[in-house]
Image: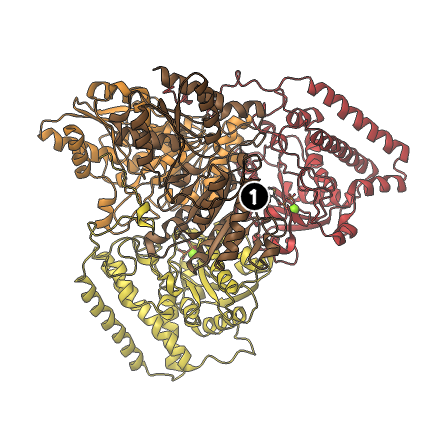
Chain colours: A yellow, B red, C brown, D orange
Amino acid sequence: MPTQKADPPVTGADFIKAYRLMLVARVLEEKLASLYRAGAIKGGVFLGRGQEALSVSVGIHLHRGDIYAPLIRDQAGRMAFGDTVLDTLRTYLGSQLGPMRGRDGNIHRGRPREGYYAMISHLGAMIPAVAGALLARRLRGESGIVGATCIGDGGTSTGAFHEGLNAAAVEKLPLILVVANNQYAYSTPNARQFACADLLDKAVGYGVVGHKVDATNLEQCLATLRRAIGAARAGGGPQLVVGDLLRLVGHGEHDDGSYVDPALKASPVGRDCVLLAEERIISENWAPAAECAKWRQEAEQEVNATVDKVRREPGPDPEDDDWAAFSNSEFAEHYAGL
Amino acid sequence: MPTQKADPPVTGADFIKAYRLMLVARVLEEKLASLYRAGAIKGGVFLGRGQEALSVSVGIHLHRGDIYAPLIRDQAGRMAFGDTVLDTLRTYLGSQLGPMRGRDGNIHRGRPREGYYAMISHLGAMIPAVAGALLARRLRGESGIVGATCIGDGGTSTGAFHEGLNAAAVEKLPLILVVANNQYAYSTPNARQFACADLLDKAVGYGVVGHKVDATNLEQCLATLRRAIGAARAGGGPQLVVGDLLRLVGHGEHDDGSYVDPALKASPVGRDCVLLAEERIISENWAPAAECAKWRQEAEQEVNATVDKVRREPGPDPEDDDWAAFSNSEFAEHYAGL
Amino acid sequence: MITYLEAIRLAQEKALSEDTRVFLYGQDVGNFGGAFKATKSLAKEFPGRVFDAPLSEDAIIGMAVGAAIEGMRPIVEMQFADFSTCGFNQIVNHAATLYYRTGVPCPIVVRLPSGGTSGGGPFHSQSMEALYAHYPGLVVMTPATVEDAYGMLLQAVALDDPVIFCEHKFLYYHLKAEGLPESVLPVGKARLARPGRDATIVTHGAMLHESLAAALDLAEDGYEVEIVDLRTVKPIDTDTILASVARTGRLLCVSEEWPWGGVAAEVISRVSSEGFGLLDVAPMRLNAKDTPVPYHPDLWSVHRPTARSIAEAARRLLHI
Amino acid sequence: MITYLEAIRLAQEKALSEDTRVFLYGQDVGNFGGAFKATKSLAKEFPGRVFDAPLSEDAIIGMAVGAAIEGMRPIVEMQFADFSTCGFNQIVNHAATLYYRTGVPCPIVVRLPSGGTSGGGPFHSQSMEALYAHYPGLVVMTPATVEDAYGMLLQAVALDDPVIFCEHKFLYYHLKAEGLPESVLPVGKARLARPGRDATIVTHGAMLHESLAAALDLAEDGYEVEIVDLRTVKPIDTDTILASVARTGRLLCVSEEWPWGGVAAEVISRVSSEGFGLLDVAPMRLNAKDTPVPYHPDLWSVHRPTARSIAEAARRLLHI
Ligand SMILES: Cc1ncc(C[n+]2csc(CCOP(=O)(O)OP(=O)(O)O)c2C)c(N)n1
Ligand SMILES: Cc1ncc(C[n+]2csc(CCOP(=O)(O)OP(=O)(O)O)c2C)c(N)n1
Ligand SMILES: [Mg+2]
Ligand SMILES: [Mg+2]
């Protein structure tokens, strides 16, 4: 689907800004994979390789004050929304100084106070939460604010997806729900996940606006998300964005993804959005190849330096933890009898 | 939506057969309402007044061996599927001889071994259960069998509706899901329940066939359900049928429904399907008015005689109950220490 | 006279009028005023702050969580406690874990019209307090009096932690009080509902009243039974329980929810562990039977503990 | 050597081959063989009887219920026990109530990969046995050995009642046995995992092995601790527990799930009520801490009971 007429063009500067964020995410995730193989990571590693263009396009169009609830494969969107290499590594390497203090990890990190929500694992669950946050903003009289969250093709089958999107539609909330259809939910192919011709067909059943995008194409992603987020911001209600792509990596780093159909890998959805974006930059003469290489080096340097720093940071100390699930710590009981 | 060309006509005999079942349901429910007011009923009373045409059209096209999971307002469909005035009254009046033996009541009655499922209250929950039953039949090599269940406009907002219908669509199961859009879920109007233009718009998002019907019109209901059930039986996968109508009674007998918009009552959806059917029978000369009156009298006689009989039956005796939730009664524990 | 139900309505009215962060969300809570009329006229009184939700328990709780993160104080109503199973995941995995995981509290109140009434049946009668108390991070309140229904609901709204508010339907209409309380015990504090010396009954919710009736019956035989109303089942006020058992030496726990892992089991486990020396005889529990709640009134009245079965159990306890 | 995980796979293979009513349904259980490979190669071996479900826990359980009504014997896998909250309603309100309500049993097996592993975190570590045991109508199995993983899963499939099968992920790979058992104890029977005389530890699941290790440690000090492996937490074999406490007079309950209303609380409540005179000293319990399960290995290893903390608790119990 080409960028619509009315849309202003995606400029080279826009494109490069997004590309550099994708690059940091890509380089960082490559490092995470190698740290995983080296046994240096606490917990599981689930990467977003191949999904950077779609993901970054969400984060990059959000403003401070907006709400963003990223999911498993949104490292690029997270970077665009303001997460850092440092916070990422602190979480994966189990530093006490990370935003989750060792209590939760990795893709579950967030800073809810800053509009950056910390996903729970149960897929779909963030959708009503973002809807509720937007409802709260409306009740407080704030406008022009949006909330975005992402979900996979598998996640569209959850009751939470349905209930959350429907409730947001009834309230006409400025929710952007981005479906990254990467063809598989773990090993389960689309054919075993849903029976509609295209996940976009769901939009009409909720009475929300639908947008389709080739998610390997950064320009399309940027333009589509700009349009969708703009429409939500302007009061157009929920926007369902469906992007087609392929997960270019296993479900997690423990998985070789051998079940992925080779025909899909060879098809247009199997293209690498980072490579495509780099080729585009060079072919449009927005920057020379050497500049792209330099950006990658810079990213690598930042990532490596941060790894070195974080590895020297202490892990959480169980003796220091107050082991309280309540914010009113006097409610914590210690089940003595010991 | 008129009956489609290819459909054979609904004959006078078909129509009358359905009408008489509707009439029994209507008369029986009128009796339930008066028994409720007299304090003779155990538990709540939720009636299907105004929904008989749609409901009966489901039950009447099912065969022995099919599966039927009726919902709150399906007295007419139940009668068509083979439930009896006797079982109905035994449940409402708390007879020990009813199919639920006092353990569950009223709209929750069923005989699962006979394909007549006993709904749980949690709306949407019967959809995956019927899907699973159909899967079981397929695994056992049975074909030509269908399963039907009903849901309200409110029930379409449940996660169970979404997950159940989607899973059925993926398996291409012969499920008929009938949505009775009676404009309200308890007091909640459609406008606060969903944002799509029509609930039928959901069909495409599940990749299932959709059918729309004016549910005050018995002929349309019969023709549409015959078509939908026939399509499912022939291997066409799940069929979503959406009927528009109005609940002509409170949500339950405790409720006066004063929140119902008078404009809706005066509009086409507010017509009484039983009256319309009777008028049609007379105007088509399928039977004279006196015959219709006689049918009503016969229904009243059966209902009244059954009430008299059932009122003399014993209620469940707590001393006789084995109070075992397990079919392996040796697993029941009695939490002694007393 | 103010009913238990009206106290709940008035508490919500007060919360709405005093705190602009409060809003009400749930099925039919708007113009209709709720299935039990616990929010009657509030939509009119507080325009735009009391509104109907779709039939979507999971979304209702999930939205409350999001709103709470943004600093609001949502009160959500489940039409019946039993339907909270459909919002269970958001309660136990999102609301309950948020503070521990992120340091951001989740001040939501989930109102659960709870417990059995005649003819309610398996899906409109459940007492789910033990279920929610098992999960870390949830305060579980079970008010047994009109005063507590009012005072504790206001406390629940003021708390930063998520509160499961188990209001008992059996008490809605026929429990009445002269007026609203000026003050309320602190959150988590139990109340000595009746002083005694011969045995302690620990109970909560509607079972308080069955227990009080049983105590009257036993008093005719000369037994003075002390009754502790837990008020909040998480946290549990173990000190007040132990102090009572120290006086009486005998313990009967009475709970309407199912026995396995219920409030009674938890209390007996605490007292046995922390107050073993205080017990003169084996502690006893009396719960609902371990089956779904039967719909027929004759079965139901045997399924849950009643004044009669409590008095019977207490007599056995007293005669050991 | 056969691992605990392989025993589960082999039990399913045997069930599929011996009973045409058995089928497997769950996320990724088909060609992929399941997230943990508990169904590896079964889809190929039993064409059309092992298949992938959409990401829909509620539908998965609901479909199993419907299939069971029609006489099948579905085994469904939740990818992690923690995700069963999304199918909670179908489990507790449909499967668990069906027999009581209608007289038609509901022979489904819900496999829950349960319990903590290093780095699992709040949503991939939960022990949900107490939750399901609270509801009437569910058999809750918690096999702790390779032999039981195999034998009990076959029993679960043969049972007419719904079974929540809590298989412990911590035991999947490193618990091994020489071969498969010829026989298995009856459903609901506990096992004396270690004879002793000084104290009784009642435990289940992965905690059995921590407890056994603790017992070895204590044996070095001359204490002989008896260990009861519950095997099934609903029903609970109270007789075997009481017989052990009768021998030792001291009781420590060790459970990985949360304390409030957990297995340990239920066991202590039973023993206190039914075997009060057998107890020489106050019974004790040791559970996971009452917070979500932390993801960092250093926090996690303190969050749940371990051989060390069990030995410590037992020493205190022995020294009272
Ligand atoms: C409710 C729920 N069930 C199961 C899981 C386990 N799980 C984690 S990721 C995953 C696959 C997700 O697929 P999809 O939504 O397509 O996202 P993708 O991994 O492809 O990005 C599953 C089944 C979960 N996280 N939540
Ligand atoms: C999951 C769930 N939540 C809430 C309820 C309470 N409840 C019973 S009927 C009803 C309204 C149903 O509306 P609709 O689906 O439109 O059916 P109708 O009553 O109009 O036939 C509600 C909210 C329920 N039964 N199940
Ligand atoms: Mg996917
Ligand atoms: Mg309706």
Q: Which sits in the foreground, B67 or D186?
A: D186
Q: Position of residue A66 (x, y in %)?
A: 44, 68
Residue D142 appears anywhere in the view: no
On-image quarter of the C terminus of chain D: top left
Please tell me which residue is depicted at 27% across the width and 26% down the height of the picture.
Answer: C278
Q: Quadrant of residue D218?
A: top left
Q: Position of residue A290 (x, y in %)?
A: 29, 81
Q: Is residue B283 above or below residue C200?
A: below
Please tell me which residue is depicted at 48% across the width and 58% down the height of the picture.
Answer: C19
Query: Could you tell whether D90 is left or right of A289 in the image?
Result: right
Q: Which sits in the foreground, C124 or A338?
A: A338
Q: Position of residue B121 (x, y in %)?
A: 57, 37
Query: Could you tell whether B225 is left or right of D134 in the image?
Result: right
Query: Could you tell whether A189 is left or right of B21 in the image?
Result: left
Q: Chain of mark 1?
A: C
Q: Residue furthest left?
A: D221
Element class at badge 1: helix
Q: Is residue C273 above or below residue B150?
A: above
At label 1, which amino acid type do we have?
Answer: Glu
On whether ligand 2 comes within 8 Å of the CB at mark 1, the answer is: no
Q: Is residue D223 above or below residue A151?
A: above
Q: Residues within 10 Å of mark 1 (few under 14, many from 20)?
A: many
On-image quarter of the N terminus of chain D: top left
Residue D245 appears anywhere in the view: yes
Q: Position of residue C279 (x, y in %)?
A: 28, 24
Query: Could you tell whether B150 is left or right of A279 in the image?
Result: right
Q: Quadrant of residue A33?
A: bottom left
Which residue is denoted by mark 1 in the rendering? C6
